[in-house]
Amino acid sequence: MQPTLLNFIDGQSVVADSGRTFDRLSPADGSLVQRVSEAGAVEVAAAVAAAKSALHGSWGSMDVAARASLLHKLADALDRDTERLLRAEIADTGKPIALAQGLDIPRGAANFRVFIDMVKAAHEASYRSSTPDGRGALHYTLRRPKGVIAVICPWNLPFLNVTWKLGPALACGNTVVVKPSEETPTTATMLAQIARDVGIPDGVINVVHGYGPGSAGEFLTRHPDVSAITFTGETRTGTAIMKAAAEGTRPVSFELGGKNAGIVFADCDFDAAVDGIMRSAFLNSGQVCLGTERVYVERPIFDRFVAAMKSRAEAQVIGDPMDPATTFGPLISHEHRDKVLAYFDRARQQGATVVTGGGVPTMPPALAGGAWVQPTIWTGLDDAASVMREEIFGPCCNIAPFDSEDEVVLRANDTRYGLATTVWTQNLSRAHRIAERIEVGLVWINSWWLRDLRTPFGGSGLSGIGREGGEHSLDFYSETRSVCVKL
Ligand code: NAD
């Protein structure tokens, strides 16, 4: 077992005054991975004070070029430390090494580089106007850091998500206090330590550990010196955080849950569509906010599509996350598995035909204590069934037939969420039409989760508030000031 993981405040590893700890168990085998020091109100206040002091001191007074150079050093150091970060992320999440190596860890450095370069290249608008005395005025805008940002992260993509927030927040000159998920506290803490080692001043990145209500998450979001809150997680948690943010009218950026539709037309490239829907339903064991839990397939190819998905789901290699051949890992915890298995039961009660899966796989003795479930496919669920309306966040989807474009658009839009849709067709006119009619923040045509970090990311309805990515991140993480000079 690793030594106790500590909070990271003002450049130091800090044991919580209360002496309270919580245990992090391996999703893959149930063993104790690490004990974690739980921050109380005292440690959260110290972290916010350190962030405030760095904002008004070393970091705040640094010019953009010096800040950018330090952040580039951080990105390079993250690349050099890939192996250690990879192991820590896998120990916390149980995700297969091929996935963490190909996606989660490399995105860390990329998230810094993209936003540093954007901030360096950002230009400020200026305007000339006339005045009654004829002398005129010059108006221009300045971007200033917003202040101390509270960064509240989920467990499904821990390193990817924290760097997605910290890249633009730090590039814009803010300081941060991060509250990683209690399930996955390690890589955010390592990031803060690596940042200190490359010379990023103390207090710029602070990390506090704990839970949400009555713990570090709530203490942080309620702290009056927090200027803005960026949160990724469940919609219900977003509601609680919004109430905390209302005190002091702090702005929020929310990336929340989804109940995303995949739409497959008969004219699609069949193999590519099966491949894309498979990935969107089962990548990271279905624990991706962008994942597809509702699949609609045009009737002429419905049976063939279901059969292809079944055989692909049954070919998943479920096993040791450290084995490069593994394609499918465990769920994050036994608690989450109980929730997902309860949905599996409910799906049967609500009339689903189980095409494949629906239970717990038999694992070798070394992995028997893990939070495993089978990749699961249903047909026959009614759109009104609660399993079709609530986010499950597990490796499962229902596949339903449809007969017309109008019908499928109506059905896909029949949800209070509005995060992502993936559409498969070779008819480009139709693809563009659907992109306009689908009420979500992200539409992928003949692809899924293909990202350019300069583009807006986020959802509507229950799926979020605001957008991050590109200019949208710069807007959230800075205050725009308008300056007027009478000439
Ligand atoms: P969660 O909401 O349970 O927890 C997220 C974080 O919020 C954790 O750090 C938790 O400790 C903290 N928290 C909980 N209650 C809090 C409170 N009252 N005050 C302050 N902090 C609090 O979410 P999760 O289970 O970790 O993650 C899964 C969810 O995240 C899914 O709903 C998924 O769709 C969503 N998600 C969305 C996106 C997106 O970009 N839209 C990306 C990833 C995950």
Image (tube, helix red, strand yellow):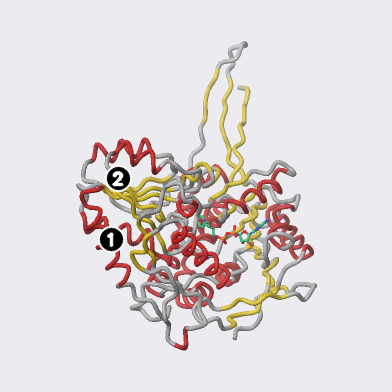
What is the CA distance from the residue labelled 1 to the residue labelled 2? 20 Å
Residue drawn at x 24%, y 56% as measured from the top left:
303
First-in-chain label (1 vs 2): 1
Residue under circle 1? 275
State whether residue 325 is above or below residue 8. Answer: below
SS class of the residue under badge 1? helix
Residue drawn at x 54%, y 65% as measured from the top left:
339
Quarter of image, res 67: bottom right
State whether residue 76 is above or below residue 443. Answer: below
SS class of the residue under badge 2? strand
Direction bottom: furthest residue: 365
State whether residue 323 is above or below residue 418. Answer: below
Picture coordinates of residue 100, whole percent (x, y): 42, 70
State whether residue 167 is above or below residue 2. Answer: above
Picture coordinates of residue 127, whole percent (x, y): 52, 26
Q: Work out whether residue 80 can be spotted.
A: no
Quarter of image, res 321: bottom left
Amino acid carrying label 2: it is Phe
Amino acid carrying label 1: it is Asp
Q: Specify the quadrant that holds the C terminus.
A: top right
Q: Specify the quadrant that holds the N terminus.
A: bottom right
Q: Which mark is residue 399?
A: none
Q: Work out whether residue 26 can be spotted.
A: yes
Residue under circle 2? 402
Q: Of discs 1 and 2, which sits in the foreground? A: 2
Q: In the image shown, does 271 or 155 lie closer to the viewer?
A: 271
